[in-house]
Image (cartoon, rainbow, N blue to C red):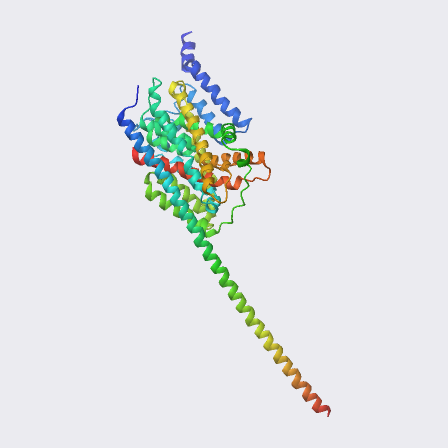
Amino acid sequence: MSDFSDFYNSTGIAGLDWQAGIMLLLGLGFIFVAVVKGREPYVLLPIGLGVIIANLPDTHMTTFVAGTAENQESGIFGIVLYYGLTFWDILPPIIFLGLGAMTDFSPVIANPKTLLLGAAAQIGIFVAFWGALTVGSFLDISFTIEEAAVIGIIGGADGPTTIFLSGVLAPQLLGVTAVVAYTYMASVVFIQPPLMKMLTSKSEREIIMSAPRDVSRTEKLIFPALAMITIILVVPGSAPLVSMFMMGNLFRESGVVPRLADTASNELLNITTIFLMVTVGTQLSADTMFKVDTLVILALGLVAFACGTMSGLLFAKLMNLVLKEKINPLIGSAGVSAVPMAARISHQIGQEGNPRVFLLAHAMGPNVAGVIGSAVVAGIFISLLQ
Amino acid sequence: MGIDSEVLREGVRLTTFGLSTAFGLLILLMVMTWTLGRGVGMQERRAIRRSEAAATANEAASREKALAAVVAVSTLLGSNADTNTEAAQ
């Protein structure tokens, strides 16, 4: 009997509690949504697997023991978390390299005004930042200023930026903030349309914008180099993200290193995504999730996202007061990164009112500008808080 | 409970610098992109004008060559005809 008891205690079943059980169901839920519903599969499938790995007892896969000579003390995801996200924080910049190699700056170059919409949508970050700072006045919890900055950056709706900033300023929030950011990015289709319809009139939604001009190769080559130098000179803290983003884009636009552009946007991006997303998922253990803080972060993330959407829309309306050639304010909501879902939603809502309204190309401008804007804000947080 | 004055001051500093830098940088980038577009556009228009002028010059030169050839052939044919007439006489 004691042999059986010893064997039972050595199994993971003995270490399983109800909280871990719920987390396993959550992991399976992520996988279900990714596989069956086809929503954000590249994010939700590896995160779901990470959640399952983290909540199975005694796997030690997320353990990291620094400076040990013993074998097998650190698990693979513990090592990836430590070196990839907290100690070196290299995985998000590598993702940015791949994103840069996949990005076309033509909409921004053709219509530089859209850069302003990308800046306006960052207001959501600061609303959530203040929400996190002042939440202690209403609830029995408090966040440090670094944690508030990380919670705020969720409003940038940019997964790698959120992960990068968490890794630098508040690694303890890494899993929660990343999952909240990706969850809301996957939910833009539910969050944004009601706000877009609420803040714009029917006639505004039906504004037809003329097709963007053709952009020359010279402009496409100069823009990333110029943007990189300017941004990094002003905000050096944004260099890891901005330099990699622009470097990837130069690989693509130069046309002389197709193998590098291809590797950055395919193999390297895919390999990094596997390790980054599974590791983020492994940060969602039961003891992290079953806390009031997590619910508050979830709520503040939603506030950040909604405020970013609204400020983008309202700023577009404000611009229309001074512009001769009016812009469709629906493209303002695409300022909250979430590339390319937010741009697609702007286009869809525009088409609902008038099938002759084509906004996809125009909305990609603020969408890409939003990526730059949130990287800039993250850089400012790093420069001023680190 | 409540917000510490130190945190409040830091929060105001971050918000002020954060928002103004984000807007300032993207406005600067907007102006630079607009100027870049104008500059490259002007350069391209100048290049087009130059190639059009070169094409026109080439066209004129080849037209003159063709004309010269026609004149030469006509002259040659004319002199041949005179010779033949003289021979017939």
Which is nearer the eye, B64 or A221? B64
Question: Is residue B24 something that shows in the picture?
Answer: yes
Q: Residue at x 45, y 57 (%)?
A: B43
Question: Extreme left residue here?
Answer: B6
Q: Is residue A39 left or right of residue A236?
A: right
Q: Is residue A106 left or right of residue A234?
A: right
Whole-percent x, y for residue A43 in the image = 47, 30
Which is nearer the eye, B79 or B21? B21
Which is nearer the eye, A382 or A67? A382
Q: Residue at x 71, y 91 (%)?
A: B87
- In the rendered image, which quarter contains the C terminus of chain A? top left
Q: Residue at x 53, y 42 (%)?
A: A209
Above/below status of A219 relative to A290:
below
Question: Is residue A151 something that shows in the picture?
Answer: no
- In the rendered image, which quarter contains the N terminus of chain A? top left
Q: Is residue A171 left or right of residue B49?
A: left
Which is nearer the eye, A27 or B89? B89
- The image quarter in which residue A120 lies: top left
Question: Extreme top residue here?
Answer: A1
Whole-percent x, y for residue A158 in the image = 43, 33
Question: Extreme front residue here?
Answer: A321
Question: Extreme right residue here?
Answer: B88
- The image quarter in which residue A117 lies: top left
Above/below status of A208 relative to B85:
above
For the image, the number of numbered tags is 0
Whole-percent x, y for residue A363 in the image = 50, 39
- The image quarter in which residue A247 lies: top left
